[in-house]
Image (tube, grey):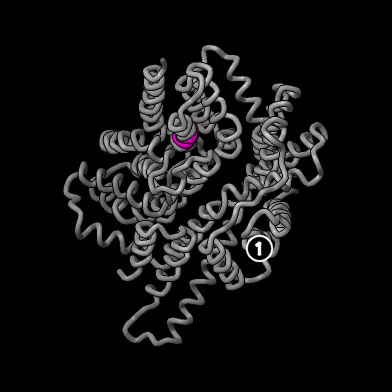
Amino acid sequence: MLVLLGIGVVVLGFVLRANPLLVVMAAALVTGLAAAWSPAADVATMGAALTATLAAFGKAFNDSRYVSAVWLVLAAIGLLERAGLQERARILIGRVQAATVGRLLLVYFVVRQAAAALGLTSLGGHAQMVRPLVAPMAEGAAEARLGVLEDADRYRIRAHAAAADNIGLFFGEDIFIAIASILLIKGFLEQNGIIVEPLQLSLWAIPTAIAALLIHGTRLVLLDRRFAKAAP
Amino acid sequence: MIALAHLYILGGLFFAAVAILSALDRANARRLRNAAFWGLLAVSFLAGDVIGDLGNGVLVLGLVALAALGLGQGKPPTTTPEERRESALKRGDALFLPALIIPAIALLGTLAAKETAWGAVLINPANATLVSLALGVVVALTVAMIWLKPPLLAPLQEGRRLMDAVGWAALLPQMLAALGAVFLAAGVGDAVGEIAAAYIPLGTPTAAVAAYCIGMALFTIIMGNAFAAFPVMTAAIGLPVVVAQFGGDPAIVCAIGMLAGFCGTLMTPMAANFNVVPANLLDLPDRNAALNGVIRAQIPTALPLLIANIVLMRFLAFP
């Protein structure tokens, strides 16, 4: 039971608003110490457990470097921003009269979810698409209709652009058979003696995907009503 | 064949350049701290396989200490808003093309590596998407450099501008993956299972399904990562109760259980790469609040969707 202290450390760090990297590190070390602790354990034993946990964390960190390798993309995005990518997106959307914030985000949300379902999770993302394109386009759509935006509205639109990206990705990607979460489920079940095909798992992600499409799609349509009311 | 090892070299060189340029940035009062942070990350990418497990652990301690002290915000040379507007008018919609090169090559490279013989020779199929994504970045950079003719250092300086905007949050997903490994080795999942069995009423299929789905969402909120929550909660409630005791279909239970966890991801600042990174990238004023604008925009979708998952699992998983 003592190993649960690590979860307690995460919760406590979250409540105290400590730096999350610090919280994660502390949780790992506490978990390793708790697993090694017994009434008979002396200082040398606990010291060895601390070193072993640090080494285990270091190994896992090193094995997971691919997670952080995606930041390379920022060099290319930054270079295009330098040449006016965001401004161009605003100009583009400003010309489309039919575009409203809700409709634009709805289109992005549906495309993001459909693309993720086909395994195209890289067609999107906050650094690649939301910051340089979707958020400026949505702001541009609102400006074209309402003129100058209040700061609160501008931030709400940006937040909804990020939300459309997340929700489209999360509830689309599991329909694709070769995505990490599907492979994790398959591997976990195999360790427990249950063999399933990735296709079975991805098939049963479809009902939730439809529910997400209906719920979030409705909210985006309603978002336009909110701004329509605000218009003079 | 291009594999993950080459991607690590490229990433290491990028982070090393960010570190050096940070050290030279006199406009940033914390420039040495930023330089040390990105420099340590460069060491991890370039030399992680030779410094040993404990060496990597000590390196992470250094990264965590620097992040906890607080990083600064660099001020790399870039264009003014007027110059950007002018450039946007002059270059037109063609500006979108280099940005679309990246996902296009990521997709084509992945398909080629998995489906064709020459693709598998060029790109390691085991990590096809990541390697192809990096190839896409390189091609997009090459096209943009030839076309836009910016200063030679511009991609590194602009990359540094955005890396500093993301800050320490850039490392949280990798840290959570490492924490998951430590939890697994220590048997945290087994311990949670014993507690759940002892204290949560799991007497009916509906109660068990609700406990599993809500548990997945809550544990994901705590851990910031449904992948970390899934083995713990499924070993605790999903397999022993929902599947073994009440006869739920394991494929359906696990598929929907993971998606219940994703509902939790939408509601937690611990999922930094999804909820905090965009708030930073979009300059939201409440980016550091526990419930920032992105999370507040997502909660009204996440809660009904969690209920939908419980209902779906209850009616689909039991024959």
**Among the 4 quarters of the image, the one containing residue A7:** bottom left
Q: Which residues are magenta?
A: A161-167
In terms of depth relative to the viewer, which is nearer, A182 or A35? A35
> x%, y% of residue A10?
38, 60
Give the answer, above or below, for where A29 lies relative to B46. Answer: below
Q: How many marks?
A: 1
Mark 1 is on which residue type?
Answer: Leu
> x%, y% of residue B133?
66, 41
The residue beneath circle 1 is B32
The answer to whether residue B125 is seen in the rendering is no
> x%, y% of residue B65?
54, 66
Residue at horizontal 47 percent and vertical 82 percent from the top: A47
Letter of the chain that mark 1 sits on in the rendering:
B
Q: Which quarter of the rendering shows the C terminus of chain A?
A: top left
Residue B75 located left or right of residue A196 = right
In terms of depth relative to the viewer, which is nearer, B74 or A69? B74
Q: Which quarter of the rendering shows the N terminus of chain A?
A: bottom left
Prevailing secondary structure of the magenta residues: helix
> x%, y% of residue B208?
23, 47
Q: Is residue B90 magenta?
A: no
